[in-house]
Image (spheres, rainbow, N blue to C red):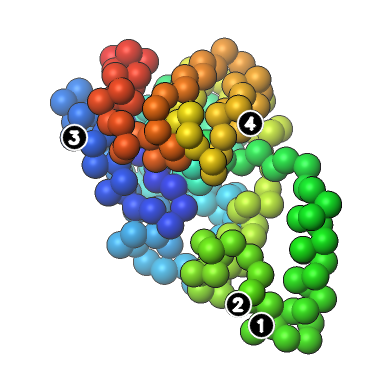
């Protein structure tokens, strides 16, 4: 069993799942490169770069076709990785899965244009006053990595997934809403099942018993 955490998170986010799944599986939960207690990035990583990291990690940890549970950003990596090599894992669980780039609103486009114009003249001001709260906390290298990650649309990769897949989304998730990302992934991944449960983007830690029951019924 391999657990892949979300962006700016760590393996500890899966505390309740590690405790539960250890009854049935050998559980491996790394801090993805650049997060948690792992080494810092020395260059901006894209989703593709993280797929290379994941492949090397699976080989070094000697994980033979593990089940994968991936949250948010971790789901981006799992989807792209398995689209190229479905046999690298057995069953797949995506929770709060991200990776769907939706059409940009006119407001968003105007804000991006304003950011680019201001950045040319006042880069420090632009970095301080534009972007999400999450983006503003990042180092320069992580910011470049973040932009590469969030701007890659994984729809085509999702259609190539052949693994038996369970999608679990919190009904109160405003980061990756079940009615948007969840339903789109469900329509793209052939044979996948979508479950909407209590909680938000971290529904697996907010309501672990309900989440773990879904895992049990799917994996065991």
Dividing the picture into quadrants, the one containing residue 8 is bottom left
For the N terminus, which image quadrant?
A: top left
Q: CA distance from mark 2 to mark 4?
A: 30 Å
Instruction: Check residue 154 in the rendering and tell me which mark sits there, or answer none.
Output: none
Residue under the point 18% across and 35% down: 19
Q: Which residue is mark 1?
A: 125
Q: Of the residues under marks 1 and 3, which one precedes in the sequence?
A: 3
Residue under the point 48% across and 34% down: 172
Query: How dense is the environment of label 2, judged by Cα within 10 Å: few (below 14), some, or many (20 and up)?
Result: few
Q: Which residue is mark 4?
A: 180
Helix or strand or loop: what does disc 4 sit on? helix
Query: How dense is the environment of label 4, judged by Cα within 10 Å: few (below 14), some, or many (20 and up)?
Result: few
Q: Which residue is mark 2?
A: 128
Helix or strand or loop: what does disc 2 sit on? helix
Q: Of the residues under marks 2 and 4, which one precedes in the sequence?
A: 2
Instruction: Give the number of the mark in front: 3 or 4.
Output: 4
Label 3 with label 2: CB-CB less than 8 Å: no
Q: Of the residues under marks 4 and 1, which one precedes in the sequence?
A: 1
**Residue 8 left/right relative to 10:** right
Q: Nearer the viewer, residue 27 or 60?
A: 27
**Residue 25 left/right relative to 218:** left
| Residue positioned most to the left | 23
């Amino acid at each position: 069993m391999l657990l892949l955490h979300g962006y700016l998170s760590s393996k500890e986010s899966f505390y309740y799942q590690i405790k539960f799944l250890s009854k049935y599986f050998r559980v491996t939960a790394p801090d993805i490169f650049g997060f948690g207690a792992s080494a810092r990035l020395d260059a901006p990583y894209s989703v593709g770069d993280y797929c290379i990291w994941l492949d090397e990690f699976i080989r070094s940890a000697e994980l033979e076709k593990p089940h994968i549970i991936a949250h948010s950003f971790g789901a981006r990596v799992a989807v792209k990785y398995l689209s190229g090599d479905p046999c690298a894992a057995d069953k797949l669980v995506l929770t709060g899965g991200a990776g769907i780039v939706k059409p940009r609103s006119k407001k968003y486009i105007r804000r991006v244009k304003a950011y680019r114009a201001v950045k040319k003249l006042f880069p420090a001001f632009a970095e301080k006053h534009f972007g999400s709260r999450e983006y503003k906390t990042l180092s320069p290298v992580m910011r470049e990595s973040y932009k590469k990650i969030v701007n890659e649309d994984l729809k085509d990769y999702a259609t190539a997934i052949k693994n038996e897949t369970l999608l679990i989304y919190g009904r109160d998730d405003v980061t990756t809403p079940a009615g948007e990302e969840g339903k789109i992934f469900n329509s793209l991944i052939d044979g996948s099942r979508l479950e909407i449960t209590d909680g938000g983007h971290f529904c697996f830690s907010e309501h672990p018993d309900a989440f773990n029951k879904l895992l049990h019924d799917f994996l065991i």
